[in-house]
Image (cartoon, helix red, strand yellow):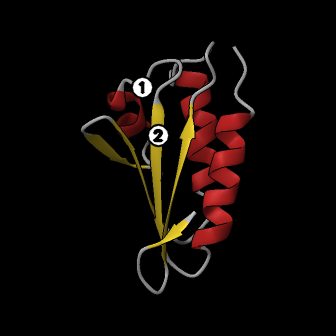
Amino acid sequence: MQTSSDTAVEATVSLPANVDLHARPAADFVRTAMGFSSQLTVASGERAADAKSLLAILALGAKRGSTLRLTADGDDAVAALDALTGCVAGFTE
């Protein structure tokens, strides 16, 4: 994880080889993000989205094996990124 300002942190994580970021995993991701007060962003390729918006996450169109760039800014930023990277790592088909 890299710190880019006093409270902002970034991390990268890859989607498992057998999971697209479709409805169920996206809902799990958003549910996890909603548990934190930090501003959370997820990016895939050239697209970025609010990690707390299911429609925005689905619009990313992230496919299996894609690298996701996670950014968090706020008091609980490190904990939020830890939880989101764990969430992605735990995705199953």
Q: Residue at x 40, y 29 (%)?
A: 58
Q: Residue at x 48, y 52 (%)?
A: 70
Horizontal side, residue 32 vs residue 6: left or right: right
Of labels 1 and 2, earlier in sequence is 1
Q: Residue at x 65, y 47 (%)?
A: 85
Nearer the observer, 67 or 86 = 67
Q: Please state, as top left, top right, bottom left or bottom right, where the C terminus lies in the image.
A: top right
Question: In x, y percent, where is residue 51?
Answer: 46, 50
Question: In x, y percent, where is residue 18?
Answer: 63, 12
The disc at residue 68 is 2
Name the kind of residue labelled 2 in the image. Answer: Leu
Crowding near the residue tagged with mark 1, few <14, some 14–19, many ≥20 C-alpha atoms within 10 Å: many
Horizontal side, residue 23 vs residue 35: left or right: left
**CA–CA distance in space, label 1 to label 2:** 8 Å
Residue at the farthest bottom position:
6
Nearer the observer, 68 or 49 = 68
User: How many labels sit on residues?
Assistant: 2
Question: In x, y percent, where is residue 52?
Answer: 47, 51
Question: In x, y percent, where is residue 47?
Answer: 27, 39
Local SS, label 1: loop
Is disc 1 in contact with disc 2, using a CB cutoff of under 8 Å? Answer: yes
Q: Please state, as top left, top right, bottom left or bottom right, where the N terminus lies in the image.
A: bottom right
> Does residue 64 lie above or below 46 as drawn?
above
Local SS, label 2: strand
Task: Name the residue carrying label 1.
Answer: 62
